[in-house]
Image (cartoon, rainbow, N blue to C red):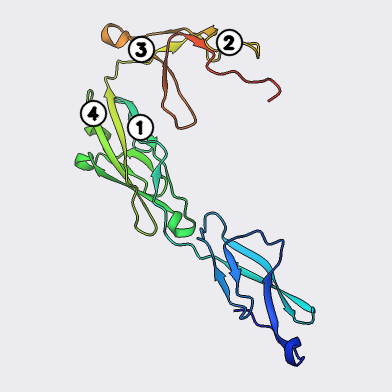
Amino acid sequence: MMSAIDPDCGVNAIVNYTLADNFGRPQFSIKPDSGELCISSSLDHETYSEFEFPVIATDRGGLSTTAMVKIQLLDINDNVPAFTVKDYKVSLKEGRISSTEPIVSVSATDADSGKFGTVTYRIVNGNDNDIFRIDRSTGEILVTKPSLVQAKSKFDLEISATDGGGMSAPEGATVHVTVMPAGIGSALFDKPRYNFRVREDVRIGTVVGSLKAAAVNRGKFAFFEYVHVRKDNKKNQLLTHRLECSSVKDKQS
């Protein structure tokens, strides 16, 4: 509650309270007669964690004074963690599995701040014989027992994410691990980098250029696919060897 004292007598001692006209936050209001500051709409720490605004006290004679009010919101645990990617695919090669290098790193975010926004990870299913372990803070997954990881083995590790307030992600993530025989190699591109030029007025669907890769294996392992690996958490896209324009951008933008 705000309070101002006017030494005048009679009606000139009556004080009214108002918020400054330039205070554009609808979350607060003030009772003109009592100076009680009230919450008038919902508050969200993730949107605004602090408010600062002037309150004006005016007497019946038109004289006024101003006081600054600062309000800090305390965060509560009102958000749950969410995985940025729900499915991870990992291929390991038998005999070349390290126990010190992570095979993949999972990630979940929480919109809260402080301890409520801190996420910890656990493997909750699929980790028979404790072959894998996860760093609870970073989400990095490592192989703890490489000798138990054999060719043609397949593991589906279910991962949970929990914030500092004990709230868990409603949907977990799954890491699909496949172990390939030691003699199986990856397809190889004929170049480490491809550069193409394209006009800014090109039509969508126009072929920009061709990529070429060759398999180093035989039989069923000689087949491979071209995949556009996205960095925006959207689903990867299968391609042909021809790279096509999927959107048009202005050179000036």
Please tell me which of labels 2 and 4 falls first in the chain. 4
Which residue is rendered at x = 72% and y = 61% of the image?
Answer: 22
Which residue carries the number 2 mark? Answer: 203
Element type at marker 4?
Answer: strand
Q: Do the residues labelled 2 and 1 touch (CB within 8 Å)?
A: no
Q: Estimate how packed mark 4 is, as few (under 14), some (14 to 19) or many (20 or more) residues with alpha carbons within 10 Å.
A: some
Q: Quadrant of residue 21?
A: bottom right
Please tell me which of labels 4 and 3 falls first in the chain. 4
Which residue is rendered at x = 29% and y = 19% of the image?
Answer: 182
Please tell me which of labels 2 and 3 falls first in the chain. 2
Residue at the front extreme? 11
Q: How far apart are marks 1 and 4 (CA)?
A: 13 Å
Q: What residue type is labelled 1?
A: Tyr
Q: Distance between the residues labelled 4 and 3?
A: 19 Å
Please tell me which of labels 1 and 4 falls first in the chain. 1
Which residue carries the number 1 mark? Answer: 88
Q: Estimate how packed mark 1 is, as few (under 14), some (14 to 19) or many (20 or more) residues with alpha carbons within 10 Å.
A: some
Which residue carries the number 4 mark? Answer: 154
Which residue carries the number 3 mark? Answer: 224
Please tell me which of labels 1 and 3 falls first in the chain. 1
226 or 96, which lies in front?
226
Q: How far apart are marks 2 and 1 (CA)?
A: 34 Å
Left or right? Give the position of 163 relative to 21. Answer: left
| Residue mark closest to the camera, 2 vs 1 | 2
| Residue mark closest to the camera, 1 vs 4 | 1
Q: Distance between the residues labelled 2 and 4?
A: 43 Å
The percent position of residue 209, horizontal first and vertical second, equals 54, 7
Left or right? Give the position of 198 relative to 230. Answer: right
The percent position of residue 83, horizontal first and vertical second, equals 39, 41
Please tell me which of labels 2 and 1 falls first in the chain. 1
